[in-house]
Image (cartoon, rainbow, N blue to C red):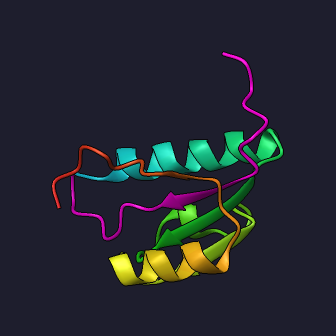
């Protein structure tokens, strides 16, 4: 698939608190997405409410927000940043 040069920045929405036996795959997919996007020169912003995940390591993203995963928090970041895309690694996770 050719690179879409219109994508300059992405907001990755973390999976939030991890339940034993669940969600580590969402953390892994978000981490891999952040790494791949940064390698391609895309600016990565990350929001997650779980400070104990590798996704919140400052080396994973250009900007990391440790905030509740609420519509209000996400909208606040979206309005503040110049974002062109977002990514939810937990798209099939039951909330």
Range covered by the magenta-colored residues: 1-21
In the rendered image, the residue lying farthest to the top is 1
Query: Which residue is depicted at the point 16% across and 54% down?
Result: 94
Predominant secondary structure, magenta span: loop
**Whether residue 94 is visible:** yes
Q: Quadrant of residue 7?
A: top right
In the rendered image, the residue lying farthest to the left is 94
Magenta run includes residue 4: yes
Residue 51 coordinates in the image, percent (x, y): 48, 78
Q: Quadrant of the C terminus?
A: bottom left
Q: Quadrant of the N terminus?
A: top right
**Whether residue 68 is visible:** no
Q: Quadrant of residue 84?
A: bottom right
Residue 29 coordinates in the image, percent (x, y): 48, 43
In the rendered image, the residue lying farthest to the right is 41
Query: Which residue is depicted at the point 56% across and 72% down?
Result: 78
- Please state if 80 lies on the left or on the right of 5 as rendered: left
Residue 2 coordinates in the image, percent (x, y): 73, 18
């Amino acid at each position: 698939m050719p690179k879409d040069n219109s994508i300059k920045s992405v907001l990755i929405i973390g999976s939030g608190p991890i339940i034993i036996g669940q969600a580590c795959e969402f953390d892994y997919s978000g981490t891999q997405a952040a790494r791949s996007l940064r390698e391609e020169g895309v600016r990565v912003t990350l929001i997650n409410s779980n400070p104990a995940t590798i996704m919140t390591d400052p080396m994973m993203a250009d900007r990391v927000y440790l905030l509740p995963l609420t519509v209000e928090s996400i909208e606040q970041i979206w309005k503040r940043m110049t974002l062109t895309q977002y990514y939810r690694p937990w798209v099939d996770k039951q909330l």
